[in-house]
Amino acid sequence: MTMKNKTNTKKKSAHHQTAKKSAEQVKPVKKMLTEYYLIPQETSISQMAELLPDYQEKIELWLEMDLMELTLTHDTMVFEEAAEDFANSEDQVYFAEHKIKKVYAITYDALDAEEVRQILSTLQAALQGRVCEEDEIL
């Protein structure tokens, strides 16, 4: 007795095809990062925006909130005034000793890190200051 290999000619279900497509199109999980920009001079969010001429079409400002949003490749980069995050006396002593006048929280997608570094480099060239994570401040 000889057996022939039978080919399954049954059409795959729509669910099977959809499941296969969704498995192929797995998007990377967003990893949002937060850093702080400590600036040794009084500045406003609109002054910072003026320092980024290449992004003028990609910037939204909320002056009353002291907030700037830049549209980058993967997501947005947000600058938000963050002095209230550092209200304790230890932070205030550090800011006084280092002449920190303005603090912005910066939030962005990790996939935009290189573009973020370029933006921060441009801002630091004009405003000085330093960028750090919260646990690096003191």
Image (cartoon, rainbow, N blue to C red):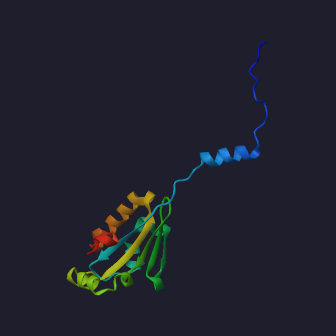
Above or below, 116 against 16 in this view is below
Q: Which residue is drawn at 60% across and 45% down?
A: 24
Which residue, as the protein is rendered here, is positioned at the far top?
1
| Residue 73 location (% of width, % of height) | 49, 59
Residue at the spot 28% in from the left edge and 87% down from the top edge? 89
Relative side of 16 to 51, left or right: right
Q: Give the quarter of the image for residue 123.
A: bottom left
Q: 40 or 122: which is nearer to us?
A: 40
Task: Look at 52% across and 54% down and name the residue there.
Answer: 28
Count of marks, rendered view: 0
Relative to 95, say whether 55 is above or below: above
Pick the quarter of the image with the N terminus: top right
Q: x, y (%) of residue 122?
A: 33, 66
> Which of the 4 image quarters holds residue 103?
bottom left
Horizontal and vertical percent position of residue 21: 65, 46
Q: Work out whether residue 69 or residue 51 is closer to the camera in this orientation and state it.
A: 69
Expressed as whole percent of the image width and height from the top left, the position of residue 25 reads: 60, 48
Residue extending furthest left? 97
Given residues 112 and 47, the one toward you in this image is: 112
Q: Quadrant of the C terminus?
A: bottom left
Q: In this view, does 29 lie above or below 105?
A: above
